[in-house]
Amino acid sequence: MGGLDKGLQAYRGRPLVEWVVRCLRPQVSWLGISANRNQDRYQQGVDSDGVWPDETDLAPDSGPLAGIVTGMRHAPGDWLMVVPCDTPHLPENLVPLLLERACQDHLDAVTPVSTDADGLSRPHWVCSLIHKRVYPKLMDEFVKGERKVGRFIQSLRWSAVSFPEHSAFANLNTLESLNGHV
């Protein structure tokens, strides 16, 4: 987005992050935000339990996996639901369905999957529910240089839950998509 803070960009009259928070807040007991800049704006404008930059012991610009490390360090409870700030149409039953599968099959992580317009099944790695017991493995992989969320999740006991609406996981990554996305 040309260097702009993506989560604070307006989509249909509200910042992207607000769409995500409004969807997730009823599904979780605690909601934190990982933001490496503009923490005050996130804290003031969004109903969250805290806003944190990536932890200082992590390499700068380490991507979403660093945000997951930070989330695991701050979040109470056993599970961490991670989602990007640019997915404003997440399912209203995302967390309960992922948690049900995780508990049923004794998994470390569960990822939503949907079928795209070409009929291909697509996992949404950065919208995953992850058990905090994997933190030591996460840190080990992070120190070794792993930065891909999907590769890390695939190294765990994981499964996928199918969601019918592929558009629910659409990422709005450009200013044009904010204005033209339906």
Image (spheres, grey):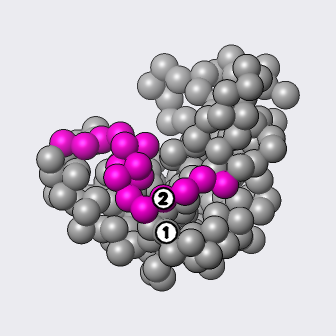
Q: What stretch is highlighted in magenta?
A: 145-161
Question: In the current view of this chain or complex, which residue is farthest to the bottom?
Answer: 77
Q: Can residue 101 be seen in this view?
A: yes
Left or right of residue 182, residue 171 in this image: left
Can you identify the residue that label 2 sits on? 158
Residue 50 drawn at (x, y percent): 49, 68
Mark sitting earlier along the chain (1/2): 1
Residue 70 drawn at (x, y percent): 34, 61
Q: Can residue 52 be seen in this view?
A: no
Pointer 1 local density, CA inside 10 Å: few below 14, some 14–19, many at least 20: some
Residue 71 is labelled as: none
On-image quarter of the C terminus: top right
Q: Which residue occupies 77% across, 62% down?
A: 93
Can you identify the residue that label 1 sits on? 107
Mark 2 residue type: Trp
Q: What kind of element bears circle 1?
A: loop
Q: Is residue 146 above or below residue 135?
A: above
Pointer 2 local density, CA inside 10 Å: few below 14, some 14–19, many at least 20: some
Q: Given contact means CB atoms under 8 Å apart, are the residues at marks 1 and 2 in contact?
A: yes
Of 70 and 48, the residue lying toward us: 70
Q: Which residue occupies 67% across, 27% down?
A: 120
Label 1 and label 2: CA atoms lie apart by: 5 Å
Q: In this view, does 132 lie above or below 139?
A: below
- Residue 9: name its quadrant: top right
Residue 34 drawn at (x, y percent): 44, 55
